[in-house]
Image (cartoon, rainbow, N blue to C red):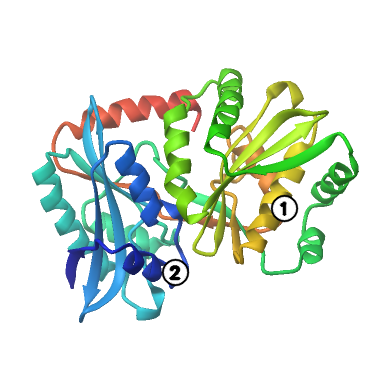
């Protein structure tokens, strides 16, 4: 195995196009977005006999409580090479340990998009990883195969979901519009802040939303959908279309209009846009078992997503590799945050 940095966008993206299990958190443009936020990144390729078999975008995360190297939803593996995950993980860890020492990072965090199987979890334990106290990105997701015709997709939905979509389509007071204008991020952000006040969580900044939008816009991989009710924008969704997958990344609905079912039509229009872009999958981005954890903050949103059809995909839980004793400061802080958020 040989690990080298990849500096060619085409090589990176063409490889990821051949991989089945992936998310935009390993895309070239997600790396560019992180750079625009002032973060250091590395794009590593793992080669076997000269062939690229896996990639890993690595981001240095820095905070007052310490710094760490993050591999979000990676490494990504091309399954056609039938390489065992253990053969990839060990050399990658050695590379990351070297980098962590150079960058004076306190730990390494890996959130792989590998199926949550005992054998995959054991790989991390055998290499002395430990479960993180709080995840950085989704550890499971709700996904829908959208290769079927629209009529078949509608037939596969929960009756209530299909009814509310059709009802909204007939309602002249409801309108869905699509925007590629970066200035419209401010409209989305204002709604986002209203949701924050209501649900009391730490928001992303306007700068964050704007820079993310600008990172994906040149390749036409992003759009904002707005739902109007009687001429007023009351809901929005922030969609990324990348490598054959549509992602439901951010959303906002003004609390005062929560009884107006515009979110169903908003989501349906985003799914149809993904189909137009020849996407094969729509990723609803994050889910929890609402029947097993009915009081979990994500239980309600997951029930909404499940209404469109699809199935859950669970990944190996986020893993931490300790480099220095300062890790435990971060561990305590994140453990407290987890309790406060009810996660």
Residue 120 x %, y %: 36, 62
Q: Is residue 204 visible?
A: no
Q: Nearer the viewer, residue 195 or 208?
A: 208
Instruction: Classify 10 Å Cα crowding around label 2: few (below 14), some (14-19), many (20 and above).
Output: few
Q: On the image, which quarter does residue 251 sit in?
A: top right
Q: Is residue 182 left or right of residue 122?
A: right
From this view, report whether residue 187 is shown above or below residue 74. Answer: above
Please give the residue where the numbered disc 1 appears in the rendered image. 308
Tag 2 secondary structure: helix
Please give the residue where the numbered disc 2 appears in the rendered image. 17
Q: Which residue corresponds to the image point at 64% horizontal and 39% vertical from the top-left?
A: 301
From this view, report whether residue 17 is shown above or below residue 245. Answer: below
Instruction: Classify 10 Å Cα crowding around label 1: few (below 14), some (14-19), many (20 and above).
Output: many
Tag 1 secondary structure: loop
Q: Is residue 255 left or right of residue 16?
A: right
Q: Which residue corresponds to the image point at 67% horizontal and 47% vertical from the top-left?
A: 305
């Amino acid at each position: 195995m040989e690990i080298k940095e990849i500096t060619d966008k085409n090589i990176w993206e063409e490889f990821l196009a051949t991989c089945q299990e992936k998310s935009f958190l390993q895309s070239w443009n997600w790396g560019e977005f992180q750079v625009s936020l002032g973060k250091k990144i590395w794009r590593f390729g793992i080669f076997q006999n000269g062939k690229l078999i896996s990639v890993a975008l690595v981001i240095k995360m820095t905070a007052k409580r310490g710094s760490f190297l993050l591999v979000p939803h990676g490494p990504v593996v091309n399954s056609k090479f039938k390489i065992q995950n253990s053969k990839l993980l060990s050399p990658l860890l050695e590379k990351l340990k070297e980098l962590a020492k150079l960058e004076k990072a306190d730990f390494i965090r890996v959130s792989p998009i590998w199926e949550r199987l005992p054998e995959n979890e054991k790989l991390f334990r055998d290499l002395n990883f430990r479960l993180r106290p709080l995840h950085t990105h989704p550890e499971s997701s709700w996904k829908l195969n959208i290769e079927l015709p629209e009529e078949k997709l509608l037939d596969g939905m929960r009756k209530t979901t299909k009814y509310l979509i059709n009802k909204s389509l007939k309602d002249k007071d409801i309108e869905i519009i699509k925007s590629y204008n970066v200035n419209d991020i401010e409209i989305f952000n204002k709604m986002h802040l209203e949701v924050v006040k209501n649900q009391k969580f730490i928001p992303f900044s306007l700068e964050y939303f704007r820079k993310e939008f600008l990172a994906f816009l040149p390749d036409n991989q992003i759009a904002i959908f707005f739902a109007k009710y009687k001429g007023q924008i009351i809901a929005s969704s922030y969609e990324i279309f990348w490598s054959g997958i549509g992602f439901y990344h951010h959303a906002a609905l003004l609390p005062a209009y929560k009884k107006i079912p515009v979110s169903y039509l908003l989501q349906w229009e985003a799914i149809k846009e993904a189909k137009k872009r020849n996407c094969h999958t729509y990723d609803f981005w994050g889910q929890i078992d609402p029947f097993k954890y009915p009081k979990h903050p994500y239980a309600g949103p997951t029930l909404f997503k499940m209404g469109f059809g699809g199935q859950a995909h669970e990944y190996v839980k986020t893993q931490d590799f300790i480099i220095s004793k300062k890790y435990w400061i971060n561990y305590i802080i994140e453990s407290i945050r987890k309790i406060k958020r009810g996660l």
